[in-house]
Image: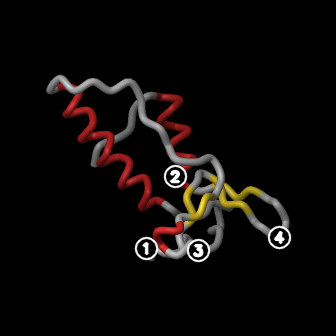
Amino acid sequence: MDLESEGEPGADGLIDDSFRTGLMKEHLVQLHKAIEEGSNCFGVHQWTFIDNWSWLNSFKRRYGFFRLDLETGNRIPKKHGVWFKELATTGSFEVE
């Protein structure tokens, strides 16, 4: 997967940004280990609900659980957002 571009929605209507899910899973696994070792953490903050562009990478990457179509104003869901909703609902995920 090209990290510079998420591409267009697939047949399921979702934009495939599953690389973010992998990154978040790894972050949460390491965070859990740190908490077990005594670190103090009260929560995790995801950057943004809807697209936000980073000037650090020339505004190429979009961050958010939904893509905003700038021409129509439509919000297009992303796979990472669906995954994160499930995580928030169940409080768990499968470690690979």
Q: Earlier in the sequence, mark 1 or mark 3?
A: 1
Color encoding of the figure: secondary structure
Q: Earlier in the sequence, mark 2 or mark 1?
A: 1
Q: Earlier in the sequence, mark 2 or mark 3?
A: 3
Rounded to the nearest angstrom, the CA distance separating label 4 from label 2 is 23 Å
Q: Earlier in the sequence, mark 1 or mark 4?
A: 1
Rounded to the nearest angstrom, the CA distance separating label 4 from label 3 is 16 Å
Residue at x 53% of width, y 64% of height: 54
Position of residue 53 measured from the top left corner of the image (x, y, whole percent): 58, 64
Q: Name above or below for residue 26 compared with residue 7.
A: above
Q: Amino acid at mark 1?
A: Met
Mark 1, mark 4: which one is toward the viewer? 4
Identify residue for label 3. Answer: 7
Q: Earlier in the sequence, mark 4 or mark 2?
A: 4
Identify residue for label 4. Answer: 71
| Relative depth, front residue between 71 and 83 | 71
* In contact (CB < 8 Å): disc 1 and disc 4: no
Q: Which mark is residue 1?
A: 1
Rounded to the nearest angstrom, the CA distance separating label 1 from label 4 is 25 Å
Tell me the element at label 4: loop
Tell me the element at label 2: helix
Rounded to the nearest angstrom, the CA distance separating label 2 from label 3 is 14 Å
Q: Is residue 30 left or right of residue 12?
A: left
Q: Amino acid at mark 3?
A: Gly
The crowding category of the residue bearing disc 4, from other C-alpha atoms within 10 Å (few below 14, some 14 to 19, many at least 20), is few
Residue at x 57% of width, y 47% of height: 82
Q: Is residue 14 left or right of residue 43?
A: right
Q: Which mark is residue 87?
A: none
Q: Which mark is residue 80?
A: 2
Position of residue 13 measured from the top left corner of the image (x, y, whole percent): 68, 61
Q: Quadrant of the N terminus?
A: bottom left
| Relative depth, front residue between 76 and 38 | 38
